[in-house]
Amino acid sequence: MIGTWHGLIIDCPDPSSLASFYEELLGMVRVQDDGDWVVIGDAPDRPGVAFQQVEGFRAPTWPTQEAPQQMHFDVRVDDLDSGEAAVLAIGARRLDGGGERYRVFADPIGHPFCLVVM
């Protein structure tokens, strides 16, 4: 092993707003907030998800790759229907695609993510 995972950084136009969406989706808490850089996680000393403000942000397109998705979360849920209702209620939107064991959504600024069942 060379190192350990420290975090995932997501480019966005408004870090605070997008962090709030993912706090609700993933059950994490805000561990750092510097305005243009916001981090959520389980605790300050554990790996987290950071949101970095960028100028000229261009939202990913789905399912085309005209603007690549760049990254996406797979979020495990017990039930796809319940999970879908919950993410739609906090600002996600359903995207084309999916299957028997997963559904594709976009966060409030267009990053794709999937709900999955095992």
Image (cartoon, rainbow, N blue to C red):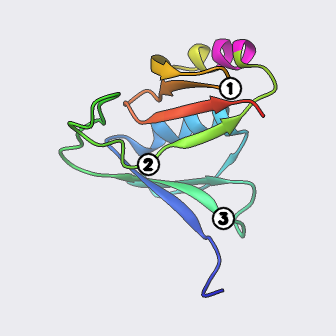
Distance in Å between CA atoms under marks 1 and 3: 27 Å
- Asked if one can make out residue 92 in the rendered structure from this viewpoint, the answer is no
Mark 2, secondary structure of its residue = loop
Q: Which residue is drawn at 58% across and 38% down?
A: 22
Residue 7 location in percent, x, y?
57, 64
Q: Residue at x 71, y 19 (%)?
A: 80
| Quarter of the figure with the N terminus | bottom right
Residue 90 location in percent, x, y?
58, 20
Q: Is the magenta stretch mostly helix, strand or loop?
A: helix
> Label 2: which residue?
71
The disc labelled 3 sits on which kind of residue? Pro
Q: Assess disc 2: are there few (<14), some (14-19) or many (≥20) residues with their C-alpha within 10 Å of its C-alpha.
A: few
Relative side of 71 to 64, left or right: right
Distance in Å between CA atoms under marks 2 and 3: 17 Å
> Which segment is the magenta one?
81-86
> Label 3: which residue?
47
Q: Can you tell which mark lies on residue 101?
A: 1
The answer to the question of whether label 1 and label 2 lie on touching residues, with beta carbons closer than 8 A, is no
Distance in Å between CA atoms under marks 1 and 2: 20 Å
